[in-house]
Image (cartoon, rainbow, N blue to C red):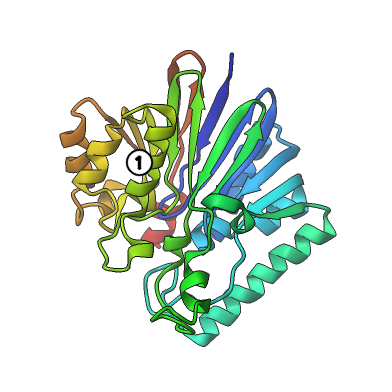
Amino acid sequence: MQNLKIHFLNTIWSDAMILESNKHYAFVDTGSLFYYPMIEKHVEEYNIKHIDFILLTHYHTDHYSNIKSLIENYKVDKLYMKHYYAIEGSTGSGSESNEEYLANEFRKYNEILDSAKEYNTEVIFIDEAKDNYYEINFQGNILELYDTDNKLYKLYSDPNSEYYNQKRFSENFNSIAIFIKVNNNTVFLGGDATCSVTDIVELKGLTLKMLDKIYAKHNINAIDIYKSCHHGGGGTNTLELCEKLKAKYCIITNTARWLDNWPTYDNLKKANDKVEILPTDHQKYIFTIEDKITYEVIKDESLFLLLSKN
C-alpha cells in the first residue's frame, strides 16, 4: 500500500510544501525569503536532515527563494527545475519588469546553480524532457509533472513567433502542475498554473488542458486534494476549472482577506458544495494519504500577516 504525507506550510502569496513517505522528505517549492525561519523551524521539528529533492514549479521569488538556504544547510540530493532565461515581461508581483529586475533574477538563478554545484546537489532541468511531461518516483509515489516545456522561451526564440525577441508575459505561464495518485486518492498541486483567457494558443487554458490529459490517462473525473493554482487569486479558479476539479479539499496558500476580489470560494462551492476550503493564513495542514485521506490542522501565527501589520 502506498503512503504519502503532504505538509502544506502556512505561507500566504507563497508556496512551500513538504512531501513525506517512509521517513523520506522532499520539497515542492520553498516559499518567499522571509518565510525561511518558519520553514527551518518546521524542518527541525520533524528532524529532517536529508531532502531527497526540491521541485520548483516555476521561477518566481515566492517559490524559489529558499532553495539556496536549504541546499546549504541540509543534504539535498536533487533539484528539479526549468532553465531561467530572464525574458519575462512582468515581475512575480505582477508589475512590469525591467532590465534591473531581470538581471537581479538571473543573478539569483546562477547563485542557486552555484550552490547546487558546491554542495553536490544534482540539477535536473525538466524543460529538457520529451513530450512536455516528466515523472519523479518518490518512495513508490509517482509525481506526474505537466507542462514541463519552457513556453516563454519558445515564444521568445522562435523567428516565426510574433513575440520573437520580445520580453513578454509572466513566468506563471511556465508553471508546472503535479498530479499524484495514492491508492485511489488523487492530488493536484497547481503551482501557479493559469487558465487565463488569451488568444495566444500556446498560453490558453493551460490548467484545463493539464486536467484533460490527467483525466484521460487515469480514467477519472475529479480531484480529491487540490492545492489551488496561484494562491486562489488572479482569476485562476474560474467556474469552468472548479467544475472540472470538483475538489473535496482545496488548500489555498492565502487568506480570505486578499481573496475578496475574486469568486474563488463561490466557484469552488458551486462545483462541490461539500468542498473543504483550507486557507493557510493562521495554520498549516498535514495530509495523510493512505487508503483514505485524513488531515491535521496545526495552528501557527502567520509571519506574512505579522509583517503586514508593521
Give residue 252's position: percent from left, percent from top: 36, 43
Who's the residue at 62% across and 65% down the image? 83
Say which amino acid is labelled 1: Asp
Who is closer to the viewer here, 308 or 28?
A: 28
Find residue 224 and report its horizontal and vertical position in percent: 37, 27
Q: Residue 161 or 110: which is nearer the viewer? A: 161
Q: Is residue 280 visible?
A: no
Look at mark 1 in the image and give the residue it sits on.
212
Q: Secondary structure at mark 1?
A: helix
Q: Is residue 205 above or below residue 6?
A: below
Q: Residue 38 vs residue 284: left or right?
A: right
Residue beneath the point at 59% across and 68% down: 84
- Give the quarter of the figure containing the N terminus: top right
Quadrant of the image containing the C terminus: bottom left
Left or right? Give the position of 236 relative to 90: left
The residue located at (46%, 73%) in the rendering is 155
310 with respect to 199 (left or right): right
As displayed, is residue 136 above or below residue 108? above
Q: Residue at x 42, y 54 (%)?
A: 192
